[in-house]
Image (spheres, helix red, strand yellow):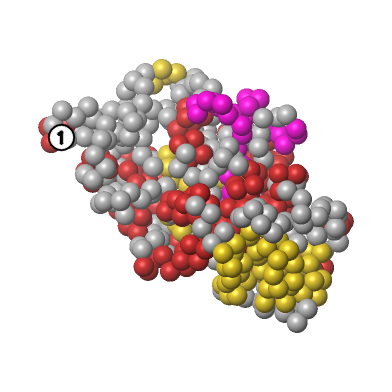
Amino acid sequence: MFQWNWDSIAAECTQFIGPAGYGYVQVSPPQEHITGSQWWTDYQPTSYQLVSKRGNRDKFANMISTCHAAGVGVIVDTIWNHMAGISSGTGTAGTAFSTFRSEDLCLLTDLEDSDGDIHDYTNRTEVQFCELVNLADLDTASPAVRAKLAAYGNDLISLGVDGFRLDAAKHIPSGDIAAILSALSKNVYVTQEVSWGSGEPIQPSEYTTAGDVQEFRYLSALKDAFTSSNLASLANIASNPTSQGWVPSGEANIFVANHDTERSGNSIAYKWDRNTYTLATIFSLAYPYGTPTILSGYYFTNNDDGAPNDGAGSCNDGSGWICQHRWSAVTGMVKFFNQVKGTSLNAWVSDQASQIAFGRGSSGFVAINYSSSIWTKTFTTSLPDGSYCDVVHGSLIVVSGGKITMAVPTYDALAVYVGAALLTSAKRGVGLGTRQLGRSMSDI
């Protein structure tokens, strides 16, 4: 829930996120940061007080308890790598601050003509001990710094936080992260931002002992597949952990886009094409690799644009929020994911590169047609016979003798799972048969 404030997330947990079957909500950094409307001010912390643009400590604590009551855990975007990049000012809690830099953070004498920033990503020392875009790098090898960061983590845990996303984890030695985590009062879910780069010495696999790792090669594979209309290439993802060095499925956190990549152009994004974005999300929730995260963001014109309406989240028309987490195709696939989790891939078929279909054990089946031609086929599945609800559209799908005969429209998809066969219009929230398979997902 990128940039939503605490009151809005609390309300959304109760009204939608919990009932929709989401397990966790990831929230923006809660600690004091530099002032400014730009989204990136959140990532320039100035103290460990829980006062940010999104609310104070009491509102943050209330959001956690409210989400828990709705059955939703809370993962906090957490910054252990750095403090603010500016030398002095006043933070969002009114705290005056001055430079955070320390003389021993970057060995300037070892880096000719260095300004203290990272320039060479093939140099491990530079990447992990110098400054990321002029942000004041923390000496995470220091016992005092580790104790301060652990104290911040324990403060969050004391309020009920269930997990951390470790921002810029690639820029912290994995041993330092392990040391900080060992000082926490309890084990929590951890996902670490460790981007992969060809020829770079720092590998995502170094961080798997501390928790999940965000597998950025997955984003690239999705983008390449949809750009080239070669969805058939996605069949290889299951073998990538061993053949191409990807993080193993059980330790990978995957997503179609995050707040950085939708601005950098390094992934599929809603600005590219909503249909493509939705189809890629359907795939990410259907294919058995990694733990998926869904970005729910807002419309922006300039990459620096902060949240609309001062962070007061709303999914009403014209609010400025995109609310991907509420798209019916996405929420239908969240239920699909929850039902088929732990089952194996089977019944893979691809009549042409832009058309793929596959099953998940005897629990689910999905077909994606990213072509300009209707895909008419009788698909063989492992599903029990019966009438099912296509959770992408709400249409009825019949399985007979384990087979489904249907025409998948152009640039569209369908998905069914055991359990969806019993849904009624009252349970679904989208009346069965009210959304025809041939309708564009942009209308959904």
Location of residue 408 with respect to 15 vertically, above or below:
below
Looking at the image, the residue that sits furthest to the front is: 373
Residue found 47% across the figure and 30% down from its top: 40
Report the front residue among 305 and 17.
305
Residue 135: % across, % down: 34, 30
**Type of the residue with mark 1:** Leu
Residue found 43% across the figure and 69% down from its top: 239
Report the front residue among 361 and 28.
361
Residue 419: % across, % down: 76, 69
Residue 249: % across, % down: 47, 64
Answer with left or right where residue 180 lies relative to residue 316: left
Mark 1 is surrounded, within 10 Å at the Cα level, by few (under 14), some (14 to 19) or many (20 or more) other residues, namely: few
Location of residue 338 with respect to 105 vertically, above or below:
below
Residue found 67% across the figure and 76% down from its top: 381
Question: Does any portion of residue 79 appear in the rendered image?
Answer: yes
Residue found 53% across the figure and 59% down from its top: 231
- Under circle 1, the secondary element is loop
Which secondary structure class fits the magenta region best?
loop
Question: Does any portion of residue 60 appear in the rendered image?
Answer: no
Range covered by the magenta-colored residues: 293-317
Answer with left or right where residue 186 lies relative to residue 422: left
Label 1 belongs to which residue?
A: 111
Was residue 313 drawn as part of the magenta stretch in this picture? yes
Was residue 25 drawn as part of the magenta stretch in this picture? no
